Amino acid sequence: MTQKNCSKKAGKIIQIDEEGVKDHLGRIVKGTVQDTLNAMLDAEADHLCNAQRYERSAGRKDTRAGSYRRKLHTRAGEVEITVPKLRALPFETAIIERYRRRETSVEEALVEMYLAGVSVRRVEDITEALWGTKVSSGTVSRLNSKIYETIEKWRMSPIEGEHPYVYLDGISMKRSWSGEVKNVSILVAIGVNREGYREVLGVAEGAKEDKASWTAFLRYLKGRGLKGVELIISDKCLGLIESLGDFYPKAKWQRCMVHFYRNVFTLVTKGKVREVAAMLKAIHAQENREEAIRKAGCVAKKLEVMKLGKAAKLLSEGIQETLSYYAFPEEHHRRIRTNNPLERIMREIRRRTRVVGAFPDGNSALMLVAARLRHIAGTKWGLRQYLKMDRLEEQARELAA
């Protein structure tokens, strides 16, 4: 062979079919996963029977009664497994349960994507990229209907026990209506029960935060069993305040002091906000209600001297609405004088719903907020004791004596 021919052969480029190689490797991996799962299922069946297939043994507990096939979505793709059936014992396998939990998490992720405003086509692309299987638009719609039913059942479930402290607030969202974008309010209530744990008490749609909407919301809470309410914490929404007496006449109302501060700041020049904030905080640092009222009088006079007459007037007229918490145990004061526990949740909801823009209807907005609240209720938020309530009971006994 000539040197020239050798050079040509040495310089030849070998081309590899990458897609073909990937497909081949994919089939190998998928087959291995399928064989492994089936072998594990057979081993579990042998363990339950206390004998291998066709083995005659005095210690045998059961015999096989055929099998059935089912499909599982794995990271290697969709595989078909053969699940053994036993004549007497139920065949409960950890393998199937693990994948059931995985399927449930996939369903929850699909629903969350849908509720967050991700388009059906985009959901299909995401599921194919993550799990190797494209979920059809029909599946997304079916899951959506399924979760709506679950959320509605949770939203209308009875409220058990008593809730001495209740926090109320509303969040405004955009909805499309006959070609126009209008506001819709979602009203939310959380509470602290007699054991000191927080609970999501209710969530409902309101046309706006007016008397009619708050009346309907309080009726919804009362009808589901909300009772034992001693203190209601909220911002000063006239529609809400007017409705409280109709449903919980014995409960005290605490105006959120943080919201009250903000109202005062709107009447203060920018350069004096820091100084006025320190003066307002001094009022709520007093040891009892009487001292707080006395301190508020001194602050109002100082505001007058600072030529902040409107702020002084607002302070004098509204300060007592922010002092209701003094009637409750001192250990609880920091957590019942503001609406911060609910405000933090509302910020999280706002963050999650901002990507949606305008909802197609009020019910979609309600379902997304309710879904998020339901998730929060099942986390450490609802499983960790928030307040020790024994002091409240001691105080009640002391007042009754």
Image (tube, grey):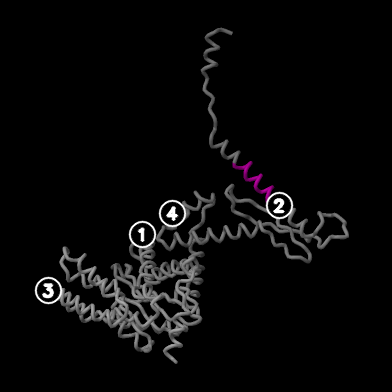
Q: Where residue 366 is drawn, which disc sits there?
A: none
Q: Which amino acid, mark 4?
A: Arg
The reply to whether the magenta stretch includes residue 180 is: no
Which residue does the numbered mark 3 point to in the structure image? 305
Which residue does the numbered mark 4 point to in the structure image? 122
Secondary structure type for disc 2:
helix
Cα distance, mark 4 to mark 3? 62 Å
Which residue does the numbered mark 2 point to in the structure image? 40
Cα distance, mark 1 to mark 3? 47 Å
Residue mark closest to the camera, 4 vs 3: 3
Q: Residue at x 27, y 71 (%)?
A: 281
Q: Which amino acid, mark 1?
A: Val
Q: Where residue 355 is drawn, which disc sits there?
A: 1
Secondary structure type for disc 4:
helix
Cα distance, mark 2 to mark 1? 44 Å
User: Closer to the N terminus: mark 2 or mark 1?
Assistant: 2
Percent coordinates x, y for residue 124 in the rendering = 48, 54
Main SS category, magenta section: helix
Label 3 packing within 10 angstroms: few (<14), some (14-19), many (20+): few
User: Closer to the N terminus: mark 2 or mark 4?
Assistant: 2
Q: Residue at x 41, y 58 (%)?
A: 118
Instruction: Give, as a single range, the part of the protein colored magenta.
Output: 26-37
Label 2 packing within 10 angstroms: few (<14), some (14-19), many (20+): few
Cα distance, mark 2 to mark 3? 83 Å
Secondary structure type for disc 1:
loop
Looking at the image, which residue sits at the far bottom?
401
Quarter of the figure with residue 26: top right
